[in-house]
């Protein structure tokens, strides 16, 4: 008997996020005959998004619209979605490992008392309504293989990690199931507005270009130069765990398994050794340029361009050169 696999769609404005597209691609690739790829949309204005979900392969879209769902609020979203899961009993519910997705997935599993697998990396069918899932454990130090599926819905949260996996061009429009949401009477939350962040505050996971520093910078002052470079390139600053532990950067700027993953176009890494826990966070980045004075530094195995040199010299020189070129936060040309 076939069952449904649900991807909980995330979007910004009128655009699905890359991760949502990727997850639809993953499910397309993993589903077996008879299983249906479905997307769940919660929000207030959903029409445009339904079209996009169709073109990325959703065969059915559960659309749940209400003013209360306009902005993510864990309790409200979990209430609406848990009710839908109880009604339709999908085989799997897949969220992204984003701040909202992780929050929602955890809440769902508690409400539904369902199995919950966070940190998933892959999905492979092994038997009828049963999938093998590989997922990260212990801050990325270990990978465990588990089985997902069965009578009870399993909730999974997937990390980004397969850019370009989603194929568009599905021409068959998805069937739309409109669902009236089951919402709590009182949310206790008042939405005041959304403040857009400048590139300095932008979430590393969302950035296009990243400048990143490690222990090799030697002191917080040189991080000032890194911020200057970020300003010139329109890029946020991130760094290694050591840089964070030494107080040179706030914790939310840590790159790696215990921090953020960056999958943008370009990462400039200064004085970072390239420990696996760090490079896991940049493995899906387009181009990595690394500066390190040790020609044997492990980061050079991951980097596309290796600069063997002292960051104390290279970083200020690079900043000066870019200033001469008149670059001012205009970003890096594609
Ligand atoms: C469970 C666990 C989870 C972890 N999670 C993370 C994580 O999410 N993110 C993370 O980053 N780390 C993480 N770590 C830590 C990780 O193992 C490394 O210790 C850390 O990434 C090293 O940071 P670093 O490269 O800045 O420092 P170091 O290892 O000290 O390397 C500094 C590098 O700078 C170079 N250098 C020194 N001086 C100069 C100079 N003047 N010019 C040029 N190069 C120079 C050196 O050659 C060296 O390669 C984790 C560890 C554990 C055990």
Image: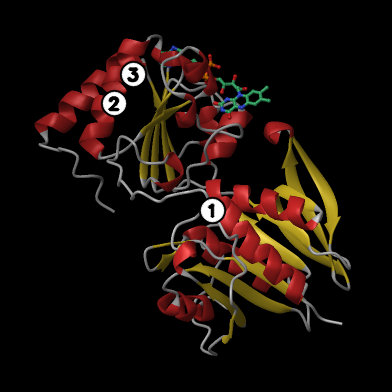
SS for callout 2 = helix
Q: Residue at x 74, y 47 (%)?
A: 135
Q: Residues within 10 Å of mark 2 (few under 14, many from 20)?
A: some
Image coords of residue 275 (percent x, y) = 60, 26
The residue where tag 1 is placed is 187
What's the CA distance linking mark 2 and mark 1? 40 Å
Q: Of the residues tagged 2 and 1, which is closer to the observer?
A: 1
**Residue 83 image-quadrant placement:** bottom right
Q: Is mark 2 within 8 Å of ligand 1?
A: no
What's the CA distance linking mark 2 and mark 3? 6 Å
Image coords of residue 93 (percent x, y) = 70, 64
Give the side of residue 96 with respect to residue 109, left or right. left
- Residue 131 shows up from this direction: yes
- Frontmost residue, 238 versus 111: 111
The residue where tag 3 is placed is 223
- Frontmost residue, 181 versus 12: 181
- Residue 90 shows up from this direction: no
Compared to residue 289, the image places residue 97 above or below, namely below
Q: Which mark is residue 282?
A: none
Q: Which mark is residue 227?
A: 2
Q: Is mark 1 within 8 Å of ligand 1?
A: no
N-terminal-most mark, 2 or 1: 1
Which quadrant, please, contains the C terminus?
Answer: bottom left
Q: Is mark 3 within 8 Å of ligand 1?
A: no
SS for callout 1 = loop
Compared to residue 41, the image places residue 102 above or below, namely above
Give the side of residue 146 with respect to residue 331, left or right. right
Q: Residues within 10 Å of mark 3 (few under 14, many from 20)?
A: many
Residue farthest top in this picture: 219
CB of mark 2 within 8 Å of CB of mark 3?
Answer: yes
Q: Residue at x 60, y 53 (%)?
A: 75
């Amino acid at each position: 008997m076939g069952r449904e696999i649900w991807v909980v769609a995330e979007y910004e404005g009128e655009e699905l996020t890359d991760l949502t597209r990727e997850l639809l691609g993953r499910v397309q690739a993993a589903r077996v005959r008879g299983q249906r790829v479905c997307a769940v949309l919660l929000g207030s204005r959903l029409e445009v998004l339904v079209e996009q979900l169709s073109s990325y392969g959703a065969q059915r879209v559960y659309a749940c619209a209400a003013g209360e769902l306009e902005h993510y609020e864990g309790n409200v979203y979990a209430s609406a979605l848990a009710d839908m899961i109880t009604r339709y009993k999908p085989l799997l519910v897949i969220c992204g490992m984003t701040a909202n997705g992780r929050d929602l997935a955890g809440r769902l599993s508690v409400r539904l008392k369902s199995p919950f697998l966070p940190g998933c990396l892959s999905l492979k069918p092994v038997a009828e309504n049963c999938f093998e899932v590989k997922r990260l454990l212990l801050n990325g130090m270990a990978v465990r293989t588990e089985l997902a599926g069965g009578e009870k819905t399993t909730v999974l949260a997937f990390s980004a990690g397969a850019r370009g996996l989603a194929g568009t061009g599905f021409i068959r429009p998805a069937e739309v199931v409109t669902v009236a949401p089951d919402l709590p009477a009182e949310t206790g939350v008042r939405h005041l507005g959304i403040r857009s962040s400048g590139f300095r505050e932008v979430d590393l996971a969302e950035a296009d270009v990243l400048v990143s520093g490690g222990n090799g910078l030697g002191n917080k002052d040189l991080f000032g130069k890194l911020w200057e470079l970020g300003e010139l390139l329109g890029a946020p600053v991130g760094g290694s765990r050591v840089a964070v532990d030494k107080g040179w950067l706030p914790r939310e700027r840590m790159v790696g398994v215990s921090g953020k993953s960056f999958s943008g176009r370009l990462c400039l890494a200064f004085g970072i050794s390239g420990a696996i826990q760090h490079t896991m966070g940049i493995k899906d980045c387009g181009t990595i340029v690394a500066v390190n004075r040790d020609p044997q530094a492990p980061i050079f195995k991951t980097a596309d361009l290796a600069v063997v040199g002292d960051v104390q010299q290279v970083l200020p020189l690079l900043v000066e050169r870019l200033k001469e070129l008149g670059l001012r936060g205009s970003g890096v040309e594609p």
